[in-house]
Amino acid sequence: MAENPTEMKTGLFDRLMRIDRRVIFVFISVALIVPLFFNVSQRIQVSPEVQMLNDAMSKVPDGALVLYAMDYDPPSAPELQPMAVAAFKVALAKKFKMVIIGLWPQGPQQANMAFETATHDPLFKDVKLTYGVDYVNLGFQSGNEAVIQKMGSDIPTTFPRDYAGTPVDQLPLMKGIKNLGNFDFMVNISAGYPGTREWVQFGADRFGLKMVSGSTAVQTTEMSPYVGKQLLGLMGGMRGAAEFEQVSGYPGRAIKFMVGQSVAHVIVIVFIVIGNIAYFATRKKRGA
Amino acid sequence: MRREIPTAIAFFVGIICIIQFFIPHRPFGTLVDVFSDWFGIVAAFAIWLGALNLLKVSLERSFSKKKTHDRWYGLVVAASFFLIFIIGMFMSGGDQFQVPGSRFDYLYVNIYTPLSSTMFALLAFFVASASYRAFRARSWEATLLLIAAFFVMLGRAPIGDQLTGFMPEGYRLSEVANWIMTYPQVAGQRAIMIGIALGVASASLRLILGLERSYLGGE
């Protein structure tokens, strides 16, 4: 005897309510991996926060002294490294004098990697930089917000040596830098605590530091209330990185990865829709 | 005295830090600089304490009598700890261990970075699976969350604008997502932040005044 069509439909919806997560994993894998093999470009609409960030960085005069605080580690690098690379490219183009630090132990090494990527861009092959004169990496210092507080009064005692162990008084760039008030601008790339929130509370608010930030996507919602006054611009997640790459004119990995992100988002939404259709179709049966 | 002396230290340091915020001159500014130095030293020791504790737990697990898979994980943690410690401390040029090209940097770039990025990337898969299970229109509030998530997820990817490119300016998905993120989201965040700030201020005052002593341990 043939099965009742209503029962068959309910069975299908029951199955759709309980799709094995491995099926979802396969779809997401394909969505993320396949676009890497194709050179597809997408038009990216620049958000107001990233436009503000780019405008703020453009207004910083050439050759200005800029603090780069890299507060993240490799797990967040897929989102944040493209931001760091693009921010260093802007610095190279505008001949900023850069002081790099990290409140996360891995931050200065991530900065080194981003800096190396930026300097290897063919656009900057003629730019010759001297360590200690054009840029310094002061490394990591433990103490979270206490480090920012101390930098507000005395940077040489907060960072007595750079990341390679050279005393700061032997670095020409550090001569004349006493505290946070000496910096014209600051770029913070942050993955959590300590990061943008602490720089806003202890640096921007207290010492009038003009700053912009790049945050992980999950952290962006917490940082957006600061945009406008304390933060002069904000990049959020890989999308923010791609927008900044586009608006600054230095396309990089984030723009390339946006294709995969687009497809993955669509797949997640399709699964959510399927789940909801199945939920409503089986609601009566569950007695809800 | 085990409780009174730490409470007195917390009171003294807390009060000086508050005063210094309004009067950043001598002696308060100088004192807070000293406290910041001490905090840095204590934080550096705390990192060591955490690392040694991790090592202790891992080694105990590795050599326990229980034959579980965890013992192998513990052994991997301990072996990795010693490997990176020995190479970083003694085989990477001393202070210059982080300089590009050092052995420590080689391990960082070629082992630590890809491994930890891989771990974090797994999140994408679990978020996708969790979204499918959690985003159900079970109630009015859940439906609102679902609608907001729909607009933000599509609007924050370039495909959102491609799908709604025919719409008039201001109504495209990225603009709707930006509106959600700029107004309702920020309003909610500000309320949460103000609530947290009031809570932190009240908890800090309780600590400074010695009303909250649980951080000292014991009963």
Image (cartoon, coloured by chain):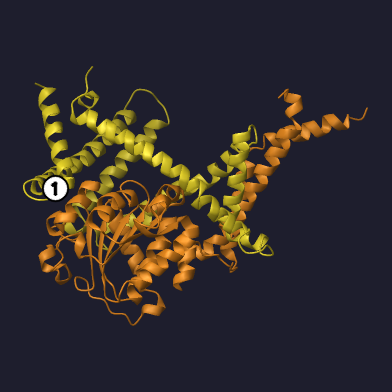
* Residue under the point 68% across and 43% down: A273
Residue B135 as seen in the image, left or right of residue B82: right
Q: Mark 1 points at which residue?
A: B23
Residue furthest right as drawn:
A1
Which of the image's four quarters has the N terminus of chain B? top left
* Residue under the point 64% across and 37% down: A20
* Nearer to me, B200 or B135: B200
Residue A29, visible in the rendered structure:
no
* Nearer to me, A281 or A60: A60
Dot 1: element: loop
Residue B10, visible in the rendered structure:
yes
**Horizontal and vertical percent position of residue A65:** 24, 69
**Horizontal and vertical percent position of residue B63:** 31, 28
Relative to A169, say whether B88 is above or below.
above
Which of the image's four quarters has the C terminus of chain B? top left
Q: Colour in which chain B is shown?
A: yellow
Residue furthest left as drawn:
B27
Badge 1 density bin: few <14, some 14–19, many ≥20, Cα 10 Å = few
Q: In the picture, one chain is orange; tell me its letter.
A: A
